[in-house]
Amino acid sequence: MKNRHYYIYIAAVLVIAGLMVAVALSKRSQSIEHEQSQSVEQASKTNFIMDTVVEIRATGVDAESAVDAAFAEMERVEKAFSRHLQDSVVTRINQQAGQWVAVTEEVIVLLEQALHYSEISNGAFDITVGRLIDLWGFGTGTNQVPSEMELDEALGSVGYQGLEIDADANRVRIPSGTVIDLGGIAKGYAVDRARKVLEAKGIKSGMIYAGGDITTIGAKPDGSAWRVGVQHPRESEELIAIVELKSKTIVTSGDYERYFIDDGVRYHHIIDPESGYPAQGVISVTIYGAQAVDADALSTAVFVLGMDRGKELIEGLPGYEAIIVNQDGNIWVSSGLADRITLL
Ligand code: AMP
Ligand code: MG
């Protein structure tokens, strides 16, 4: 008898366990159905961030809220790294020049990237050009050609070697009198961050267009590559090339983006840290690669280096390609880009 009871008991336990598994499985299949029934959306929104028109497109489940979150992230990055906003970390570092300033790891990593590009470009890329940018009036609104004396004086505050990063203690220090400006790298960083937000939300097809900085997730919804135009440096309505992108980025630096003309001479916003004057020789540089933060720093660096030294830097960097236009309108395309570009 005892044994019989025992078997009934086991059978009951097995039946209950079986029911539990069945319920769990049916719940699971319900939740899969639920996901499948959520419709795939195409979202596209435009905003004005970082002094430029930003368009974000995404296709996927909840694409619209993913796009909103990506914009929010770009706004956060702008608030952190603009030196024209009162409570940004860059403003704090500049205001407390000469003293150590506590910063987050995010700031340390971006400043380390900026220093890396200073080093590999022999100082052509240098975020300590802030006082020069101010003298020329870029960012402040009133442009003027500074005097030699003013330039000489400001040049004394320029030099990436003066930027100290204490990664162990999460603090940074710039020399008293130095002003940093992340305008040459922050937009690329913001674009990367926005892309990562979209990816984290499950978006498999998307594009972020922020002025000259464009990054893509996967291919277009129809599976073909994104086709992105490179602006003609002198005819704003024309393109010089179309580049095909799949999960890649292009970033362009041009002398047409911010400039003024004085006495027939064009003065633009990309400054040669050696002379203090706008860099001469090339008028547009487009960098193709994986991360926008790197492409952004490189586009500014190659612009300052000019055609010959710029070519050399790019050909020595695996994963990064370039289109360089010199002042005579000659276009150079690096070897790795040939099969992804159509010159117009
Ligand atoms: P981009 O359009 O990316 O080439 O960046 C140009 C911006 O970078 C300027 O508006 C300045 O804020 C900053 N900048 C100018 N010259 C330099 C330089 N030589 N190195 C680093 N940043 C620079
Ligand atoms: Mg740049």
Image (cartoon, rainbow, N blue to C red):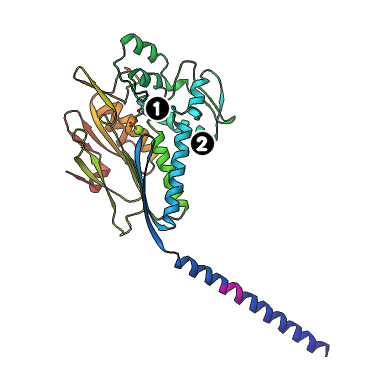
Sequence-earlier tag: 1 or 2: 2
**Relative to 130, 259 lies left or right:** left
Residue 51, above or below 342: above
- Asked if the residue at label 1 sits under 8 Å from ligand 1, the reply is yes
Looking at the picture, how far across and down is residue 316, in whole percent?
A: 32, 35
Q: Nearer the viewer, residue 142 or 213?
A: 142
Query: Would residue 216 be seen by someone viewing this image from the given angle?
Result: no
Q: Residues within 10 Å of mark 1 (few under 14, many from 20)?
A: many
Secondary structure of the magenta portion, mostly?
A: helix
Highlighted range, magenta: 22-26
Secondary structure, mark 2, is helix
Q: Amino acid at mark 2?
A: Glu
Q: Which mark is residue 118?
A: 1
Q: Rounded to the nearest whole Å, what is the CA distance between mark 1 and mark 2?
A: 19 Å
Residue 284 relative to residue 64: left or right? left
Residue found at x 30% / y 17%: 144
Quarter, ligand 2? top left
How far from the left and from the top, in percent, is residue 92? 51, 25
Q: Which residue is at a point 42% across and 39% down the rendered structure image?
A: 190
Identify the element where label 1 is drawn: helix
Relative depth, front residue between 36 and 243: 36
Compared to 295, does 91 lie above or below? above
Identify which residue, 193 or 316, lies in the foreground. Answer: 193
